[in-house]
Image (cartoon, rainbow, N blue to C red):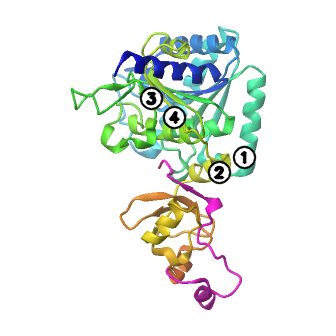
């Protein structure tokens, strides 16, 4: 890449960063923890950098991993050590570690005259419109008070179907809740690479990504960090979602001294990911990502073309297969005959009814299920194509 291209991309980065006013910062377990649990020095450095950004007028929501790792550090000693595996162990370790993690943040920010607030969320909190609105209002008040919301998944009570899976996913969803305009992901890597550097010595860092949708994330990413649950794939998936919402993402090493402030000042650290030119509606973002798809509709080529090219709704006549057991209003994947996922949407029919009417016209549907039914299996207003799943 030429120096001119580098300069142009850095200028784009700086323009976006200069516009940021409300930032979601996610920090991973691999950054926060050492062999014995939470690294207090890292917490102090992070609090110092966030306080500097707040002094400039930025509002920051901090999505923090580390509760399970902190609990593991307490439970596992040199004399006796448990292996943390499975959800019950993880939830118990989180219960041990969460208060210790929050105490470390309280102390570090208090030394800088800043109040912290703890918010523990599950996917169900964001799926319910009323609870989503309550969360948005709470964040708004906290920002007005000059507090730092410290957010984590409510590991202790969450069940598998309601968990975010990793805090990268939570951070991307939180962007929509707080109406943030920048996602910063502090990780153990110094950016995004063309391949896993641990496996490929020729892998090179991507300083700038113009079109994240054009990347083959599965081919680029492999492996997870030793103490986290995500990995670069989940970070790039979160960046794809942020891009759809119109927010850029900065993936940078949290282990580099002062990296957060230096990156926000426009220094060429990590990888900057440009958002889409046109953002999707917040409502479609919520319906696509605040729930987990519970089934799959396979559609024929004609229906796939109608959806992707002509912006049409999905009609029962275009459905060739139904997988899963779900009710009306459930979120399902919509896939082509080649297996490629076209998007997700909320269905108007139960799975058992869709199996009876797939491939049929409306008149034939009424003969099977009775009159007064939906013409569409999934209406286009309740559908998001090219969802980052």
Magenta-drawn segment: 359-388
Choose between 162 and 367: the one closer to the eye. 367
Q: What residue lies at 34% left-to-right and 44% top-to-bottom? A: 218
Q: Nearer the viewer, residue 138 or 87?
A: 138
Which quarter of the picture shows residue 23?
top right
Give the mark nearer the N terminus: 4 vs 1.
4
Q: Name the residue carrying label 3.
A: 69
Tell me the number on the disc at residue 131: 1
Foreground tag (2 vs 4) = 2
Q: Are marks 2 and 4 in contact (CB under 8 Å)?
A: no
Q: Is residue 370 magenta?
A: yes
In front: mark 4 or mark 1? 1
Q: Which residue is mark 4?
A: 94
Indicate the position of residue 76 as horizontal and vertical percent values: 39, 27
Q: Is residue 183 above or below residue 214?
A: above
Mark 3 crowdedness (10 Å alpha carbons): few <14, some 14-19, many ≥20: many
Instruction: Name the disc covering residue 127, or none.
Output: 2
Nearer to us in this view, 12 or 171? 12
**Residue 36 circle label:** none
Q: Tell me which numbered mark, 2 or 4, is placed earlier along the sequence.
A: 4
Q: Is residue 9 left or right of residue 189?
A: right
Query: What separation in Å lies between label 2 and label 4 (alpha carbons)?
Result: 23 Å
* Percent coordinates x, y for residue 223 in the rendering: 31, 37
Q: Which sits earlier in the primary sequence, circle 1 or circle 3?
A: 3
């Amino acid at each position: 890449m030429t120096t001119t291209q580098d300069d142009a991309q850095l200028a784009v980065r700086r323009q976006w960063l200069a516009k940021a006013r409300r930032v979601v910062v996610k920090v991973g377990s691999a950054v926060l923890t050492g062999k014995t649990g939470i690294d207090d020095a890292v917490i102090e450095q992070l609090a110092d950098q966030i306080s500097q950004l707040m002094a400039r007028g930025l509002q920051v929501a901090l999505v923090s991993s580390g509760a399970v790792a902190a609990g593991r550090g307490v439970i596992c000693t040199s004399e006796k050590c448990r292996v943390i595996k499975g959800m019950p162990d993880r939830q118990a370790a989180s219960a041990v570690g969460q208060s210790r993690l929050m105490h470390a943040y309280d102390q570090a920010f208090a030394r800088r005259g800043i109040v912290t607030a703890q918010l523990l969320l599950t996917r169900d909190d964001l799926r319910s419109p009323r609870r989503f609105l309550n969360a948005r209002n709470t964040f708004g008040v906290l920002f007005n008070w000059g507090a730092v919301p410290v957010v984590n998944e409510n590991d202790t009570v969450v069940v598998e179907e309601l968990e975010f899976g990793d805090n990268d996913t939570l951070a991307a969803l939180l962007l929509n809740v707080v109406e943030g305009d920048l996602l910063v992901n502090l990780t153990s890597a110094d950016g995004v690479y063309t391949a896993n550097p641990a496996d490929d010595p020729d892998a090179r860092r991507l300083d700038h990504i113009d079109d994240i949708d054009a990347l083959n994330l599965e081919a680029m990413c492999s492996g997870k960090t030793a103490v986290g649950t995500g990995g670069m794939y989940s970070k790039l998936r979160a960046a794809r979602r942020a891009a759809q919402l119109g927010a850029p993402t900065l993936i940078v090493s949290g282990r580099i001294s002062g990296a957060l402030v230096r990156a926000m000042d426009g220094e060429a650290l990590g990888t900057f990911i440009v958002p889409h030119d046109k953002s999707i509606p917040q409502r479609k973002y919520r319906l696509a990502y605040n729930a987990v798809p519970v089934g799959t509709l396979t559609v024929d080529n004609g229906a796939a073309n109608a959806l992707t090219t002509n912006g049409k709704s999905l009609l029962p006549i275009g459905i060739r297969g139904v997988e899963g057991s779900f009710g009306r209003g459930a979120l399902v994947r919509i896939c082509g005959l080649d297996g490629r996922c076209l998007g997700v949407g909320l269905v108007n029919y139960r799975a058992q009814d869709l199996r009876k009417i797939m491939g049929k016209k409306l008149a034939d549907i009424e003969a099977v299920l009775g009159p007064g039914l939906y013409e569409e299996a999934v209406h286009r207003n309740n559908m998001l194509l090219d969802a980052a799943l």
